[in-house]
Amino acid sequence: MAKRQRRADGYTVGQWANGGWWSRVTTGYNEQGNPKRKAFYGNTRAEVVERAQAFKQKIDKGGFAPEGRDTTVAAWLGHWLESFIRPHREPKTTGYYEGFIRLHIGPALGRIPLRKLTAAKVRELMSAKAAEGLSPSTVRGLRATLRAALNQAWKDGLIDQNVAQKVAPPKIEAKDEPMHLTPEQVGRFLDNIRNHPLSPLFAFTLSTGVRIGEATGLRLSDIDFEKRTARIAVQLQRIDGKLQHKSLKSKSARRTLHLADTAIAAVKAAKAAQLIDGPANPLGLVFLNTEGRPLDQKYIDKRLKALLVAAGLPPLSFHKLRHTVASLMVAGGVDLHQVKEQLGHSQISLTANLYAHGVSEAERRAANVLDEIIKRGTLYES
């Protein structure tokens, strides 16, 4: 048996109990959606790593196309995932694509030769998954994954057309508006949790609209108290079971936010709690759990819903706090471009589609007193 193994950039390395070493590079997926791998063996770790890296570089440079023009859908999907996605995208995004390939696309379409895949087959798959109970948004994600992979195959000359592009995505029923809290509900929520350890995190989020990973990854060095700004440049992600900082890749996501009184007070409260509790903080984070460790996103979402219910409010996810900020900014008459900059959206069309709905005059007046309502809690008084 292997003593240990570690996932590297597109390959796996491990050591046998007898001292020998091995490495494996994923080259594709079989008809069941399971990965096919090329294995290398040697007496030292350096030897098997060198062979795996050389093979992986050959794939990345386009020197290897699985089975050429006769490749199957499964083989191409595996090659696309390992060559074009895993080296360049975030682990969470890679896992998103990998799940669709392994669970849905590979088992249904994997044995079909890539050049013989038809729009009818793609349509049948989408209909079958909808009949199985998959939501329209999940089926859309499945189609998007296949469309992206086939688009690269078309660019590489393996197919003459992208058949997934010919299949319309399922319609998603329009919701009235993104669900969010009203200013009065924000005030009630923060009043209710003013003594809770997560109160500074939620107050900061409701004042800035940051994403959950941006909030949990915020560092004390990102805060400029004199200029009253926060530099949003990294996020906290769980990679290989460990919470780590990852840089925000897009220019729009990397941004500097002005901090209102509520946000400044929240950061100071979080910093003060660290000084009182005193555990080490090697990542220099602003927001920590009660044991002085980085906050887990699933834990935050679970606690948020419980705290909202305790305050007599709907059990919204953390992302809905972001919706709350954006919706109230729009209700207060803030320009959509500024809302886009605040949220770190890549395109203003996304901001407009989500938040450019009509608002009443009452909503506008309510948004104007949001910060005053938030400050009801003594912790956030200026």
Image (cartoon, rainbow, N blue to C red):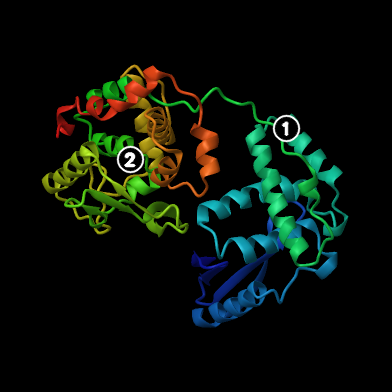
Q: In percent of the image, x 53 and y 68: which residue is there?
A: 9
Secondary element under disc 2, as helix, strand or loop, is: helix
Say few, some or many: other residues with alpha carbon within 10 Å of mark 1 (under 14 / 14 to 19 / 20 or more): some
The residue beneath circle 1 is 130
Residue 241 visible in the displayed image: no
Image coords of residue 10 (percent x, y): 57, 66
Q: In percent of the image, x 37 and y 23: which residue is there?
A: 364
The residue beneath circle 2 is 208
Going from N to C along the chain, the mark reached first, 1 or 2, is 1
Which is in the foreground here, disc 1 or disc 2?
2
Residue 350: quadrant of the picture = top right
Residue 83 visible in the displayed image: yes
Image coords of residue 302 (percent x, y): 39, 32
Image coords of residue 169 (percent x, y): 72, 38
For the N terminus, which image quadrant? Answer: bottom right
Gap in Å between the C-alphas at discs 1 and 2? 38 Å
Residue type marked 2? Thr
